[in-house]
Amino acid sequence: MEIFAEQKDFGVRTFGMPDNPGYLGVCFGRVVTANGPAATHGRDANWEAVLWHEFTHVITLQMTANRMPRWLSEGISVHEELQANPAWGQRMGPRYRAMILGGELTPIAGLSGAFLSPKSPLHLQFAYFEACLVVDHIVGRHGIEALKAVLRDLRDGVEIQAALAARTAPMKELEKSFAEFAAAQARAMAPGLDWEKPPAPDASAAGEATLDAWVGAHPTNYWALREVARRAMAAKDWSAAKPALQRLLHLFPEQTGADSAYPLLASVHRTLGETNLERRVLSEFASRDREAPDAYLRLMELATIDGDWPEVRRNAERFLAVNPLLAPPYRHLAEAAEATGEPAVAIEAYRTMLRLDPANPADTHYQLARLLRPTDAKDARRHVLEALEESPRHRPALRLLLRLQTNDLPSHPSGAQR
């Protein structure tokens, strides 16, 4: 594993030039190169999922002696992400649904070309999703052993279409069954929602009236409900925004990503002071979305207030999987670990905080000293002195220093301390 803090270094190591065409990680047989969290400049990515994806490539490339088409390699890696964690990988969304039902599905025989020359970045992401769908279809219809047999055939030099035909079904039949499977998956997404597109935007008064009438006539339309919520939130009419967002989530609970209604509804609950409802909505969102650090952080705050330490730790770990270079989640992790009787985890979290320029280094040193005192008085004294160097009037640190000094004083033969 070679992880780089600078995109240009990753680009040179991986592609021989400093440009990075959007890749997070690349696998070369037994070597994986990856952009580290510092290299993505604010672009959220779940690094646990990325490295799981790349390590799956290591396995499949070794199994096939590097003789496999890219689409199959990528499809298996995305498939395995979802097997490891339902919040990882890719899933059906409005855009992918429209692309599948709109005739943009690439035949299996030409799927590698969708990776080599995509029409847009969206089409490249769709290629990953479609490749995963093909793997899902093969495993679901023919079993995991059939997929393994295909990989072994590839290792032995069998061409991919011949291997698929031998281990699953003739290509014509496989192409047909896959197209039917993909279309069924698309139609099964939020079947209670109307997916008809609204009329084209028109800024005129007549255009607004037409759109209003269309929205009113389509009470279960995905786009209409989003428009109702958008307008209500823009007008700060929370009582109107809430039912529209609730209906969206009731009819389409699987939605994730930047367009999800979950964070919007959570913000409405927060504005209205409905903290328990806010936490419930964010918890559901966090369980589905692998890259939602704002939701994870808010859940840490709410769970800390409630003393729900397992939930604090769960969301601290979710946050760190996306961005391990910020101090706040380590503080929450340390507090949760201490509260649940895991001081070693808390100590490690505070040590990491100190490397990340925390807002209050004096208190971080003090917390470390307090936790280290029972097992390592020398290290505890060092940290308490560093806390006082940062903040000479830090009263808890001064009291702790006195206790450390008292404990070190030799005892008088009579038992009294000198």
Image (tube, rainbow, N blue to C red):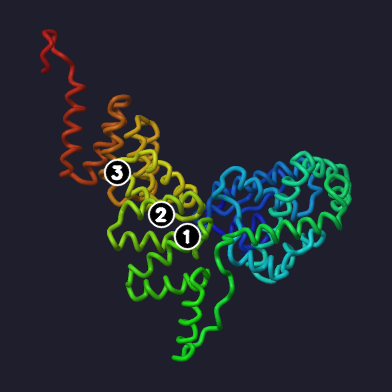
Could you tell me the amino acid type at mark 2?
Answer: Val
Callout 1–callout 3 Cβ contact below 8 Å: no
Q: Secondary structure at mark 1?
A: helix
Q: Nearer the viewer, mark 2 or mark 3?
A: 2
Q: Which mark is residue 281?
A: 2
Q: Is residue 365 visible?
A: yes
Residues at marks 2 and 3, CA–CA distance in whole angstroms: 16 Å
- The local secondary structure at tag 3 comes to helix
Between disc 1 and disc 3, the foreground one is: 1
Q: Position of residue 7 (x, y in %)?
A: 57, 59
For label 3, count other residues whose C-alpha is less than 10 Å away and answer few (under 14), some (14-19) or many (20+): few
Mark 1 or mark 3: which comes first in sequence?
A: 1
Name the foreground residue: 61 vs 97. Answer: 97
Disc 1 target residue: 249
In the rendered image, residue 14, in percent from the top left (x then y), is placed at: 66, 55
Task: Find disc 3 in the rendering and name its residue.
Answer: 306
Task: Give the amino acid at mark 3.
Answer: Asp
Callout 1, which amino acid?
Answer: Leu
Does residue 66 appear left or right of residue 357 in this picture? right
* Residue 133: image location, x then y, percent: 70, 54
Name the residue furthest front: 217
